[in-house]
Each structure stands twice: as C-alpha cells, then as structure tokens.
Image (cartoon, rainbow, N blue to C red):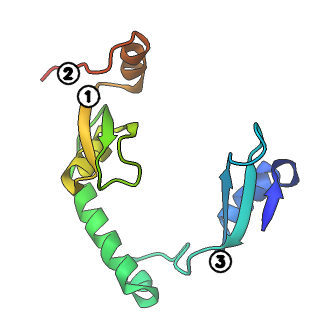
C-alpha cells in the first residue's frame, strides 16, 4: 500500500516498525521533494529471536545470519572509513562513509575497497569539506 507522508505520524511509523508481519519503507522517487511511504507484509522472521527460531522459519536466512555474526565478532576496529563499492557490491563505485568495522567486513567480503580511514565522523567531514579525500589514520 502506498501512502503520502502526512498520513502517517512518527508514532504510527514506530508502531508499524515494531509490528511483526508488517513493514514500512520509503522512497524519494516520484514527486520532487516528497517522500512516499510503502506499508506491506514483512518477512516471516521479523521480530523472531534466536537463530534456532529463525532456522525453523528459513534455514538459508539463519545460515546467512550466522556468517554475518561470525564476521562481525572477528572485527573490532574503531573510527570511520570511506569505502568504494566494488563490482560485487549492490551499488558499485558508490563512495560510502561507514564505521571502520563495517569497512573491514566489506573489504573481506569483496564488496568494498578502502579509500581512507578517519578517527571520527567529524574528522572525515573536515577533511572531505576541505576538498581532500584520503587521510591516513596514524598507526
């Protein structure tokens, strides 16, 4: 179901987001300057806790979650990084500012190339605002 932004309040969106079986998403495509929201059926495992419970609903999703959890535990880096999506990424060539932990996970998965590391988002914005991109983090 497609609805306009004024129809749904922030509290209603939170209620929808917390309701199993229902999802909400949005897009800026369409009328310029307007956001359109879509409400529909969510995946069956929304709100289900525990890998065993998810495995009962969808073994493939549970397997993917196990891999993601193991990869996440493996990386403990801090800071933020600028990453370029590789050809294996959902959006190849796009530059993303993400936590360094995520950047290292993307690099390991082959979906991202590290462009630069920063100690904080503030530092990244300062460097990029000055017209520079790459600034190595001191070791």
Q: Earlier in the sequence, mark 2 or mark 3?
A: 3
**Within 10 angstroms of label 1, few (less than 14), some, or many (20 or more) residues?**
many
Res 81 quadrant in image: top left
User: Is residue 14 toward the left or the right of residue 64 in the image?
Assistant: right
Element class at badge 3: loop
Q: Earlier in the sequence, mark 1 or mark 3?
A: 3
Q: Are marks 2 and 1 in contact (CB under 8 Å)?
A: yes
> Which residue is identified by label 3?
21
Mark number, residue 2: none
Q: Are marks 2 and 3 in contact (CB under 8 Å)?
A: no
Element class at badge 2: loop
**Looking at the picture, how far across and down is residue 86, in whole percent?**
28, 47
User: Is residue 72 toward the left or the right of residue 42 in the image?
Assistant: left
Q: Earlier in the sequence, mark 2 or mark 1?
A: 1
Mark number, residue 117: 1
Alpha carbon of mark 2 to alpha carbon of mark 1: how far?
A: 6 Å
> Which residue is identified by label 2?
136
């Amino acid at each position: 179901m497609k609805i306009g932004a004024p129809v749904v309040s922030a509290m209603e969106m939170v209620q929808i987001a917390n309701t199993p079986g229902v999802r909400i998403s949005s897009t800026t495509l369409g009328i310029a300057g307007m956001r359109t929201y879509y409400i529909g059926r969510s995946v069956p495992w929304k709100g289900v806790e525990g890998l065993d419970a998810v495995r009962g609903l969808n073994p493939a999703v549970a397997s993917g979650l196990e891999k993601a959890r193991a990869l996440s535990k493996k990386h403990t880096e801090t800071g933020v990084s600028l990453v370029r999506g590789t050809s294996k990424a959902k959006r190849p060539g796009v530059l993303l500012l993400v936590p360094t932990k995520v950047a290292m996970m993307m690099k390991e998965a082959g979906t991202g190339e590290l462009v630069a590391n920063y100690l904080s988002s503030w530092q990244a914005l300062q460097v990029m605002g000055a017209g520079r991109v790459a600034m190595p983090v001191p070791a």
